Amino acid sequence: MTDPNSGTDVLERVFEVIRDRRGDDAETSNTARLFAKGRAKIAQKVGEEATEAIVAALAETPERLAAESADLLYHLMVLWAEVGITPDEVWAELGRREGLPSGRQADAETETS
């Protein structure tokens, strides 16, 4: 039996909740509040959470890094929803890169930046 809290299953469910909350009241939903602040603020939050994950990786416990990673993924998915892409599009891009030799993967990353 597959764990319902593993891998892409949980990410897909969280993404659906994020999209569903887009139109909610910003007074009662943190996700709706982020959407109301706009793309620049959401992107800023992704950067802040990435920095917190780096700090946790360098100076804190693995559990703290896991918590910060969850925050980063959540904010990244809010940004995806804001921009109009889905996790499936990200998974497809990862799949496209999966078979590339490491040097070619770096080229693919440069092309998409």
Image (spheres, rainbow, N blue to C red):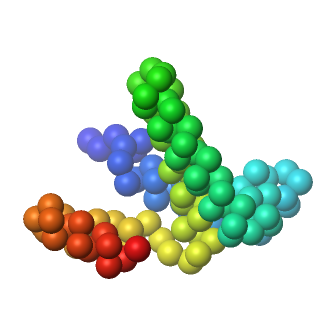
Question: Can I make out residue 79 in this image?
Answer: yes
Count of numbered badges drawn on the protein: 0
Residue pictured at 89% horizontal, 54% vertical: 27
Q: Is residue 63 left or right of residue 95?
A: right
Q: Is residue 45 left or right of residue 85?
A: right
Instruction: Residue lying at the far top in this picture: please name it.
Output: 61
Question: Can I make out residue 20 in this image?
Answer: no
Give the camera-side residue of 14 and 52. 52
Residue pictured at 43% horizontal, 31% vertical: 57
Quick one: quadrant of the C terminus? bottom left
On screen, residue 95 above or below 58 = below
Residue 44 coordinates in the image, percent (x, y): 66, 57
Quadrant of res 51: top right
Quadrant of res 105: bottom left
Q: Is residue 101 left or right of residue 32?
A: left
Residue 76 coordinates in the image, percent (x, y): 54, 58
Give the camera-side residue of 99 and 47. 47
Residue 20 coordinates in the image, percent (x, y): 66, 65
Residue pictured at 79% horizontal, 58% vertical: 33
Residue 13 coordinates in the image, percent (x, y): 51, 56
Quick one: quadrant of the N terminus? top left
On screen, residue 44 above or below 89 = above
On screen, residue 13 above or below 60 = below
Instruction: Residue lying at the far right in this picture: please name it.
Output: 27
Residue pictured at 65% horizontal, 53% vertical: 45
Give the camera-side residue of 39 and 10. 39
